[in-house]
Amino acid sequence: MKLASLSAVKVGVHRYALDDPYYLVMALSWPAFVAAVLAMFLAANLVFAVLYTLAPHAVANVRPGNFADAFFFSVETLATVGYGVMTPATLYGHVVATAEIFVGLFLTARSPAPSSPVSPGRGPGWCSAKPPSSPGRCR
């Protein structure tokens, strides 16, 4: 992978090793990265919207059974926008909203951009070079 004048090389492992999600994300193209983040965002909001609709009146001002209201409340909560029109109204609503906020913070912290710099010496199999002097070695 090349970032401006810096090349990140992972030696001795498969290119798309699932045991290293950080490198997997960094190896994605921008369109693939945006698609992956959008898919995770939509999936998380769909899951939480379903949880909100399971308990009618869990969220104030959400019409019972209205999936769109629950979905958009989920989007506002995950994004920490909180317009104030819809708020958790029951213990169940507060528990689900708390879990959603935690997931949102976790996803934000764990979603590096493909152009993030890779520092040398990140661990076994990592190096930073312009380009490696020979396969399996970094200069």
Image (cartoon, rainbow, N blue to C red):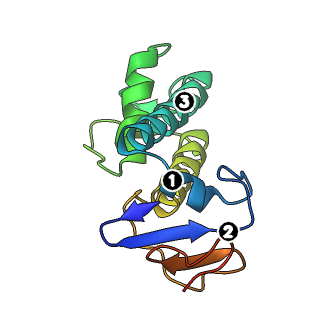
Query: At numbered mark 2, what does the secondary structure look like: helix, strand or loop?
Result: loop
Q: Which residue is mark 3?
A: 52
Sequence order check: which comes first, mark 2 or mark 3? 2
Give amino acid for label 3.
Tyr
Q: CA gap, disc 1 to disc 3? A: 36 Å
Tell whether label 2 touches label 1 (CB within 8 Å): no
Q: Which mark is residue 47?
A: none
Q: Which residue is mark 1?
A: 27
Q: CA gap, disc 1 to disc 2? A: 14 Å
Sequence order check: which comes first, mark 1 or mark 3? 1
Give amino acid for label 1.
Ala
Quarter of the image with the C terminus is bottom right
* Circle 1 Cα neighbour tier, 10 Å, few/some/many (<14 / 14–19 / ≥20): some
Q: Which residue is mark 2?
A: 11
Residue drawn where x is 54% and y is 59% of the image: 106
Asked if 14 appears above or below 8 in the picture, the reply is above
